Every structure is written in C-alpha cells, then in structure tokens.
Amino acid sequence: MSSDRLRIIATAVLFGLAVPAAAQSPLLGPEVERVVNAPEGASFVPDAADESDAMGRVASYTMALARRDFASAYAMLRLSFQASNPRLEWETNLRKRETLWADGIIRVLRLSWYQDPAGQPPGLYAAFDFRGDRADGTMDCGYVVVHRAAPGSGFTIVRTDTSEVPIEMMEDGIPKAEVLRQLPCYLGKGIATAF
C-alpha cells in the first residue's frame, strides 16, 4: 500500500470518517466540542446532513493538501477567497511550508457553527479547529472554515489558518507556555492560547 494511501486512511480515521464509499461522511465523534451561533432571536440547530457535508468538504480539502494536489485543493476555495489569494501565490506559500499538511494526520477538536453571521455573505458556516501531531514530535494547529450559501448547495472553503510548532518549542506533547500564548489556535478547554 502506498504511503499516500496510508496517509489518506489515517486522516479518515482521525476525522472519524469511514473508509468505505458512502454517500455522506459520518459525523464527528462525541469527543469533538460543538458550538452553535445564530443571530439573536433566531433558532438554529445543524442536522446530521449539515455536519456530514461540511466534514466531507474539510476532509477532501485536507487530503488534497496532504497529497500535494494543490489544483484540487484550490478548486474547493470560495471564489472570493481565490480572488484575494491568486493561485500561484497561494500554492507557493504552501510549498514553502513543505511539512504543513504533509502527513495528512489531523484531529478535529471543535466544530463551531454560524448561521448568517454579521458582516459575511449569508448562509451556514462551520469552523473546524484542529491539531496535527507528527511522528517527529512537532505539531500543527489551526482551523478551516467552510460556507454553504443555500440549503442543498455545496460547502466551499472560505478561510484557513495553520501554525507549525517545532520540536524545540514543545514540552510533554504540548507547546511551551511562551508559545501557547502566541498561537492563533484552539487546543482544547483549559489550554490558554491567543485564540
């Protein structure tokens, strides 16, 4: 089995996705924190199909990046995100960080839902905060935000941010205190970061 195939399977397992072909991606596990934000006075509860569709888009995006299939990953970006991140510049920046996304193993820590957030195009947004631990003791953390403009339409990637933490800045599997305060990442309840 190729290392790319193993990487994809490992990503699928950590995301809680089943490897067999299915029409929808399974939901994330109960250990993932979930937060729902709706406009004042509005009632909104995402359903299983919302979570499956959003997770499917994030999984496809991160697996494309793990395979270094930048063309496929870029095609998943919302057009306005592409407009502010020309393809060549976007891909060059990712290639400069060759270890980022390279092992394809990330773990979703929190899923935050936003229905029609102020100042953004209307629709449903889902933010996936994640952590990636590598075999060499280094770590990535960050988030991927997806958006669906209307029920039944597909999710697109609207924002991503990832930080890398080298081994010398890690201690007992977590970033050292002085690094934690600078990370724009969510690493779980009780871990104080700049996020």
Image (cartoon, rainbow, N blue to C red):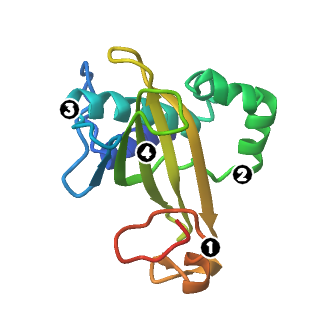
* Horizontal side of residue 64 vs 46, given as left or right: right
Q: Which mark is residue 47?
A: 3
N-terminal-most mark, 3 or 1: 3
Q: Is residue 47 left or right of residue 175?
A: left
Q: Position of residue 113 (x, y in %)?
A: 35, 42
Distance (Cα) linking label 2 and label 1 = 19 Å
Mark 2 Cα shell of 10 Å, populated few (<14), some (14-19), many (≥20): few
| 1 or 4: tag closer to the N-terminus | 4
Indicate the amino acid at tag 4.
Answer: Ala
Q: From this viewpoint, is residue 123 visible?
A: yes
Q: Residue at x 43, y 66 (%)?
A: 187
The mark tally for this picture is 4
Q: Earlier in the sequence, mark 3 or mark 2?
A: 3
Q: Residues within 10 Å of mark 3 (few under 14, many from 20)?
A: few
Q: Is residue 140 above or below residue 128?
A: below
Gap in Å between the C-alphas at discs 3 and 1? 34 Å
Q: Amino acid at mark 3?
A: Asp
| Disc nearest the viewer among 3 and 2 | 3
Whether residue 5 is visible here, answered yes or no, is: no
**For residue 138, what is the image quadrant?**
bottom right
- Foreground mark, 4 or 2? 4
- Disc 2 secondary structure class: loop
Residue ID for mark 4:
127
The image quadrant that residue 163 belongs to is bottom right
CA separation, marks 4 and 2?
Answer: 23 Å
